[in-house]
Image (cartoon, grey):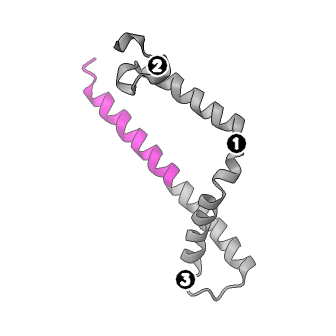
Amino acid sequence: MRDQRSASALSSEDLSPAERSLRARLAVHTLHATSDTREMTAAARAGFLAKFEREVDPDGILDQTERRRRAEHARRAYFIRLSMAAAAARRAKRATSAGDDPS
């Protein structure tokens, strides 16, 4: 009976990693073809920027334009820190891998 199920009815455990990847790619392309993903994520993006606005102006005393300008810089700094941390992690991983190589 199990062999008679359609491909879409198979659980992830029944699929190879390549098949799971294809299924995920199909799902994301279907989503983008049928929905405006900018609209879907607008609330999340607004909340993310609001976090930086609260960080740079916790008392709410700055004018909206200045608060938004500073929040944008805080957001950029956040992503630069993430990028630096990722580079450090890659460097550490390479160093570990090089140390494990007996040749």
Frontmost residue, 65 versus 102: 65
Specify the segment rendered in magenta. Answer: 82-103
Label 3: few (<14), some (14–19) or many (≥20) C-alpha neighbours in 10 Å:
few
Q: Is residue 92 magenta?
A: yes
Q: Position of residue 19 (x, y in %)?
A: 47, 19
Q: Is residue 93 magenta?
A: yes
Asked if residue 99 lies left or right of residue 86, the reply is: left
Q: Position of residue 6 (x, y in %)?
A: 47, 16
Q: CA distance from mark 2 to mark 1?
A: 26 Å
User: Secondary structure under badge 1?
Assistant: loop
Do tag 2 and tag 1 residues touch (Cβ < 8 Å)? no
Which is closer to the viewer, label 2 or label 1? 1
Q: CA distance from mark 3 to mark 2?
A: 47 Å
Frontmost residue, 31 versus 84: 31
Residue drawn 65% across and 51% down? 40
93 vs 101: above or below: below
Residue drawn 64% across and 64% down? 46
Do tag 3 and tag 1 residues touch (Cβ < 8 Å)? no
- The answer to which of marks 3 and 1 sits earlier in the sequence is 1
Which is closer to the viewer, label 3 or label 1? 1
Q: Residue furthest right?
A: 65
Q: Amino acid at mark 3?
A: Pro
Frontmost residue, 15 versus 83: 15
Please tell me in which quadrant of the rendered image residue 66 appears. bottom right
Q: Amino acid at mark 1?
A: Ser
**Numbered label attached to residue 21:** none
Q: Quadrant of the C terminus?
A: top left
**Numbered label attached to residue 18:** 2
- The answer to which of marks 2 and 1 sits earlier in the sequence is 2
- Residue under label 1, please give it: 35
Q: Residue furthest front?
A: 1
Residue drawn 40% across and 18% down? 16
